[in-house]
Amino acid sequence: MENIIASQDVRVERKHFTIVYCENERGKFLRITEESHGRRNHVIVPSTGLEDFATALETVMDVVEQDL
């Protein structure tokens, strides 16, 4: 059983991403789901790693912004 704390949907071209922050009996986590052509892929990041994950994403996004 999961308790959803926050959720956001994003559409990019033919892909649909759902970003959900939730908790279950094992703790809190972030789940990113990609839906494309009837398939689903998930990435799950435990809450203990969210700060490192966000820092890595910001680092990559800085490069992306310079490349645009």
Image (tube, rainbow, N blue to C red):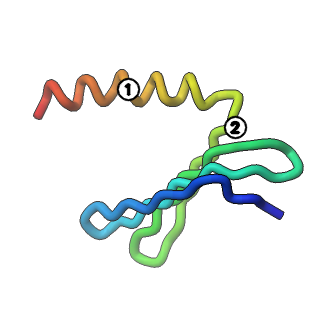
Q: Residue at x 49, y 60 (%)?
A: 18
In the depicted structure, whether residue 66 falls above or below residue 22: above
Q: Residue at x 88, y 50 (%)?
A: 25
Q: Residue 3 location in percent, x, y?
A: 75, 59
Residue under label 1: 58
Q: Residue at x 22, y 31 (%)?
A: 64
Q: Residue at x 66, y 53 (%)?
A: 5
Residue 18 as seen in the image, left or right of residue 27: left
Residue 42 as seen in the image, left or right of residue 36: right
- Counting residues from the start of the chain, the first of labels 2 and 1 encountered is 2
Q: CA distance from mark 2 to mark 1?
A: 18 Å
**Residue nearest the viewer, comparing 6 with 67:** 6
Q: Residues within 10 Å of mark 2 (few under 14, many from 20)?
A: some
- On-image quarter of the C terminus: top left
**Residue nearest the viewer, comparing 23 with 12:** 23
Residue under label 2: 46
Amino acid type, callout 1: Glu
Q: Residue 1 location in percent, x, y?
A: 83, 64
In the depicted structure, whether residue 59 falls above or below residue 24: above
Mark 1: secondary structure:
helix
Q: Residues within 10 Å of mark 1 (few under 14, many from 20)?
A: few
In the depicted structure, whether residue 68 falls above or below residue 38: above
